[in-house]
C-alpha cells in the first residue's frame, strides 16, 4: 500500500543532488522525502489532508549546511555594535557608532562591537585603546576583529582585566604595545584576560541567542550547521541551553555540536562523564566533535606559518599549543571515541594537526572517524596527500575568499595568498570538502560563499587562483551533500531522495544557472522547510 503524502511541492525546478539532478515535484511523508518525479507521478500520492505548495517555477534544493559557524555567537552579535566595513568603513565611523551606543548604555556597563577589518580601513591600522576611550570613556569597551582572534580593549576594559604596561604576554597570546604603552590590542589567548571579567550570559540569554541565530539561518535557506566551539562563552551551561532550547521548541535549525577542548576552557571532561561523546543525540541536536585552537587568523597575522608574514620578518604567527600536548590530547580524545575538528589555518598548524591525527590513527585505527581540519587555509608540500591517506577532511570557508582574499595577498604575498583554501584541489582528490561562513566572522549569507566557489573572486574582484574554481553543481554539492558528509550524516540529509530528511530551501533565482553576480547580489531565500514543515516563508 502506497503512503499518502503529507506535503507535495510541485511546479518547480527541484535540484535533488549532483547525481540525481532536477525533478518537478516532490512528496513528503512523516518528515522525509517520500518520492520525487513528474507532477502526475507525485500528485497520485495526494490525499484529502495533503498540503500542496506551488513553487511557481522557483528553484529548490536540499537545505544548505554551514560546515562551521558559531550559532550562539551569531545570535549575540546581532545585539552588538556593528563594526563591519559595510557599516563602519573607517575608524571614525566606528568611534561614532560606539559613542551612540554609549548614550543609551548605563555607565560602567560593557559595550561590545564585532566585525572590523583593519585591512579595509583607509589607514590599514587597527583601532586603538585611545580611539575607544574617545568614543566611550565611561564604559569598558571591546571591539573584536572579524576573525575573532584579535580584540581591541579600551582603558576601562584593560583595567578590569588587570592588564598593565608590565603584564607579560600569556602563552599563546600577544598584548599589543606602542612605545612600551598598551595600545589595546589583545590577540589569541591574551583576549581571555578581559573576557574572563565580562559578565557571563544567563541560560535564558543563551537560549535567546540560539533561537535568534537559528531563525536568521533559516531565512537564508540554511537548515543545518555546526556550532564550532560550544563552551567558549559560558562553559558547560551552553550544553544545557541547547538542550533546553530543543525541549522548548526554540531550536530552529539542526546543530552538530563541537565541544571546546582547549586546556583552559574545556567542557569535554564533563561531557564525557555524562556520555556525551561523538554521535550522542539525534538528527536535530547531536554531539559532533571536539575542537582545539592551534593557531590564529591569517588576516590578523596570527596564523602559524613556516614563512614569515610580508614586511614582518620575525612574525610567523602564533603557536597556541606545544606539540607534545597536542599529540597527547588528540590521542586521548580519539581513544575516548571523539571525532576532532581542530582549528588550523597556517601550514605549521596544519602540520602539527596532521601529525597528531596520524599518530592517533596509527595507534587506534578507525577507517571512518573523519577527523577534520577547520579552515585548513594554507596547506603546503605533501600535506594534502597525507590528509587524503588518513581520511582527514578539510573544512574550509570559501566566504573567507570573498571577504578576506585581498588581505591574504597583502599579508602573505601573491604566491601564498592567492592559493588560500584550495577547494578545487581537494575536490579533485576526492576529499569531499564542505564549506561554511564561520559566522560571525563572516555573515552566514550563503551567496558570497557560493559566488567564491564558482568564481574565486574577492569583494574587490581579485581572482584567487582560478584553478580552484568549482563547477556549479559541485559547488552546490559542497554546500549540501558534502556538508552532511562532514558530519557523518550523508545517509540522513544533504540530498532530496526518498528516505532523507525533507529539509528544503527555495530561492528567488536559480543557483545553477543565474550569473554569479545575480546570485551574489539579487538572490534571496523565499521558503525554508525543516522535515517538511514550513519554518520560513517570504513569499
Image (cartoon, rainbow, N blue to C red):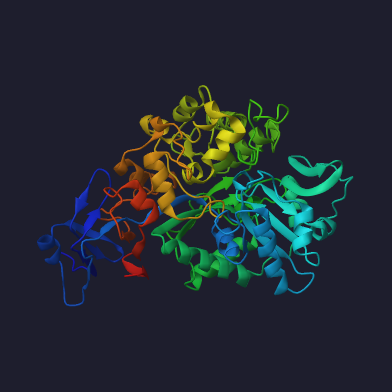
In this rendering, position of residue 414 left or right of residue 27: right
- The percent position of residue 69, horizontal first and vertical second, equals 52, 52
Count of numbered marks:
0
Q: Would you place residue 311 above or below residue 520 in this image?
A: above
150 or 272, nearer to the observer: 150
Task: Name the residue at 44% across, 47% down.
Answer: 487
In this rendering, position of residue 156 left or right of residue 507: right
In this rendering, position of residue 523 left or right of residue 465: left
Task: Name the residue at 54% across, 65% down.
Answer: 210
**Residue 234 in view (yes/no):** no
Q: Residue furthest right?
A: 166
- The percent position of residue 94, horizontal first and vertical second, equals 66, 58
Q: Would you place residue 33 above or below residue 212 in this image?
A: above
The quarter of the image holding the N terminus is bottom left
296 or 253, nearer to the observer: 296
User: Which of the 4 image quarters holds residue 368?
Assistant: top left
Q: Would you place residue 329 above or below residue 106 in this image?
A: above
- The percent position of residue 527, horizontal first and vertical second, equals 33, 65
347 or 45, nearer to the observer: 347
Task: Name the residue at 51% across, 34% down.
Answer: 420
- The percent position of residue 324, horizontal first and vertical second, equals 69, 31
The quarter of the image holding the C terminus is bottom left
Q: Would you place residue 265 above or below residue 526 in this image?
A: above
Amino acid at each position: 500500500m502506497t503512503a499518502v503524502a503529507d506535503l507535495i511541492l510541485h511546479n518547480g525546478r527541484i535540484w535533488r543532488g549532483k547525481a540525481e539532478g532536477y525533478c518537478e515535484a516532490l512528496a513528503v511523508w512523516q518528515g522525509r522525502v517520500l518520492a520525487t518525479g513528474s507532477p502526475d507521478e507525485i500528485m497520485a500520492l495526494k490525499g484529502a489532508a495533503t498540503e500542496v505548495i506551488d513553487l511557481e517555477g522557483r528553484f529548490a534544493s536540499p537545505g544548505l549546511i554551514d560546515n562551521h559557524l558559531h550559532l550562539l555567537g551569531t545570535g549575540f552579535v546581532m545585539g552588538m555594535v556593528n563594526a563591519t566595513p559595510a557599516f563602519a568603513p573607517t575608524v571614525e565611523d566606528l568611534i561614532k557608532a560606539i559613542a551612540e551606543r554609549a548614550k543609551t548604555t548605563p555607565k560602567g556597563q560593557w559595550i561590545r562591537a564585532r566585525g572590523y577589518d583593519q585591512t579595509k580601513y583607509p589607514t590599514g591600522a587597527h583601532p586603538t585603546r585611545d580611539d575607544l576611550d574617545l568614543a566611550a570613556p565611561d564604559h569598558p569597551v571591546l571591539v573584536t576583529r572579524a576573525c575573532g582572534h584579535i580584540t581591541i580593549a579600551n582603558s576601562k576594559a584593560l583595567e578590569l582585566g588587570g592588564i598593565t604596561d608590565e603584564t607579560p604576554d600569556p602563552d599563546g597570546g600577544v598584548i599589543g604595545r606602542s612605545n612600551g604603552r598598551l595600545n589595546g590590542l589583545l590577540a589569541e589567548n591574551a583576549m581571555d584576560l578581559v573576557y574572563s571579567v565580562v559578565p557571563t550570559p544567563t541560560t535564558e540569554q543563551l537560549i535567546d541567542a540560539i533561537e535568534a541565530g537559528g531563525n536568521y539561518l533559516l531565512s537564508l535557506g540554511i537548515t543545518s550547521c555546526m556550532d564550532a566551539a560550544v563552551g567558549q562563552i559560558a562553559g558547560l551551561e551552553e550544553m544545557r541551553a541547547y538542550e533546553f532550547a530543543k525541549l522548548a521548541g526554540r531550536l530552529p535549525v539542526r546543530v552538530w555540536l563541537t565541544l571546546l577542548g582547549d586546556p583552559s576552557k574545556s567542557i569535554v571532561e564533563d561531557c564525557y562523564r555524562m556520555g556525551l561523546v561523538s554521535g550522542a543525540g539525534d538528527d536535530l541536536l547531536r554531539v559532533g566533535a571536539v575542537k582545539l585552537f592551534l593557531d590564529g587568523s591569517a588576516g590578523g597575522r596570527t596564523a602559524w606559518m613556516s614563512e614569515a608574514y610580508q614586511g614582518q620578518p620575525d612574525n610567523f604567527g602564533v603557536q597556541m599549543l606545544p606539540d607534545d600536548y597536542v599529540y597527547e590530547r588528540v590521542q586521548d580524545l580519539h581513544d575516548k571515541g571523539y571525532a576532532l575538528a581542530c582549528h588550523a589555518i597556517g601550514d605549521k598548524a596544519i602540520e602539527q594537526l596532521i601529525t597528531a591525527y596520524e599518530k592517533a590513527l596509527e595507534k587506534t585505527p578507525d577507517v571512518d572517524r573523519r577527523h577534520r581540519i577547520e579552515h585548513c587555509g594554507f596547506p603546503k608540500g605533501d600535506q594534502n596527500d597525507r590528509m587524503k591517506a588518513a581520511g582527514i577532511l578539510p573544512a574550509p570557508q570559501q566566504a573567507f575568499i570573498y571577504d578576506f582574499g585581498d588581505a591574504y595577498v597583502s599579508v602573505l604575498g601573491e604566491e601564498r595568498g592567492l592559493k588560500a583554501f584550495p577547494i578545487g584541489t581537494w575536490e579533485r582528490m576526492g576529499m569531499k570538502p564542505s564549506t561554511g561562513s564561520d559566522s560571525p566572522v563572516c555573515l552566514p549569507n550563503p551567496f558570497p560563499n557560493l559566488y567564491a566557489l564558482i568564481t574565486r573572486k574577492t569583494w574587490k574582484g581579485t581572482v584567487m587562483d582560478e584553478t580552484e574554481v568549482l563547477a556549479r553543481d559541485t559547488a552546490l554539492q559542497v554546500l549540501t551533500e558534502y556538508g552532511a558528509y562532514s558530519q557523518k550524516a550523508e545517509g540522513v540529509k544533504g540530498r532530496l531522495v526518498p528516505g532523507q530528511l525533507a529539509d528544503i530551501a527555495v530561492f528567488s533565482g536559480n543557483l545553477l544557472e543565474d550569473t554569479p553576480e545575480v546570485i551574489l547580489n539579487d538572490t534571496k531565500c523565499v521558503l525554508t522547510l525543516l522535515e517538511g514543515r514550513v519554518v520560513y516563508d517570504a513569499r
